[in-house]
Amino acid sequence: MQMHKEARNFMIRQQAGAIIALSLLSACAPLQLDSRPQTGAENCGDVLEFHSIASRLSATAGQEMREALQPNGGAADSCNRLRLALLLGRPDVPFRDDTEAARMLAGFLADPANARHPQRGLAQQLADELAERQRLLTAQAALEKALAQERQHAQALTKKLKQLQATTASLRQRVKAQQSQLDQLKSIEQDINAKERAVENPVTGKEGEKAHEPKQDTPG
């Protein structure tokens, strides 16, 4: 029951945030039906409050806001570019689009009519932050790529080391087998040598001793 109540309150807060944002947009931006001329130096309202409200929009509400703020060549384009950049440039929203935000800010800053715009400093700061964020992301991507390459290199070295270890183990087995064969050959050679010596000296033991005893004279 408590969870349903909290979910309902969360949805109400989201809807309220979207309504406030749309109301702020309507109040700050020049309306299509307003026939009064608008200048590029006109203040776009409390853009920082809009920036804060944008962070509370759902993905659907943010997309609707994005479509509503698309420049159309009218007098509200300068403010809309700035608000759209604020909307899309937040790093904590599901509809974040740094590329589009940077493009909106570049258009705002490049417009000669905005040379003395009250929000030009904010636009420049946002553009610098986006550029720095992009630089950091590029550096991070380069580091991740280098790390991935180092991992691949390490894996290749590990594989090669395992192959060398397997080769070394195989060589040791071969050496061991050859040593065993050599020992057997030596044993066979010793047996052959012993047999050859026995053939060359057939009288051994007692028989050999008798053969070498001196003959005794018999009494006559």
Image (spheres, helix red, strand yellow):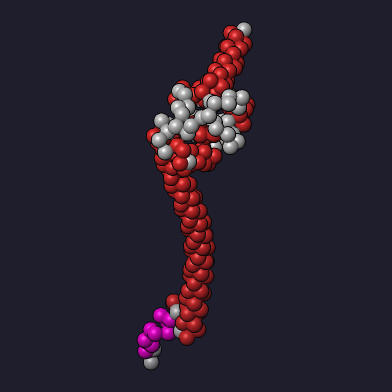
Where the N terminus falls, by quadrant? top right
Residue 110: x %, y % from top left: 47, 43
Secondary structure predominantly adopted by residues drawn in magenta: loop
97 versus 204 height, above or below: above
Q: Is residue 32 left or right of residue 165?
A: right
212 versus 150 height, above or below: below
Q: Is residue 126 left or right of residue 84?
A: left
Where the C terminus falls, by quadrant? bottom left
Is residue 36 visible in the rendered image? The answer is yes
What is the residue that sits farthest to the front in this orientation? Answer: 36
What is the residue that sits farthest to the bottom in this orientation? Answer: 220
Residue drawn at x 39%, y 85% is: 212
Q: Between residue 7 and residue 85, name the one nearer to us.
A: 85
Is residue 21 visible in the rendered image? The answer is no
Q: Is residue 211 left or right of residue 159?
A: left
The answer to if 195 sits in the magenta stretch is: no
Residue drawn at x 53%, y 29% is: 37
Q: Between residue 203 and residue 114, name the one nearer to us.
A: 114
Residue 29: x %, y % from top left: 53, 26
Residue 35: x %, y % from top left: 58, 26
156 versus 212 height, above or below: above
Residue drawn at x 49%, y 50% is: 145
122 versus 171 height, above or below: above
Residue drawn at x 41%, y 80% is: 209
What span is colored magenta in the figure?
208-217
Q: Please state the total of marks drawn on the protein image.
A: 0
Residue 139: x %, y % from top left: 43, 47
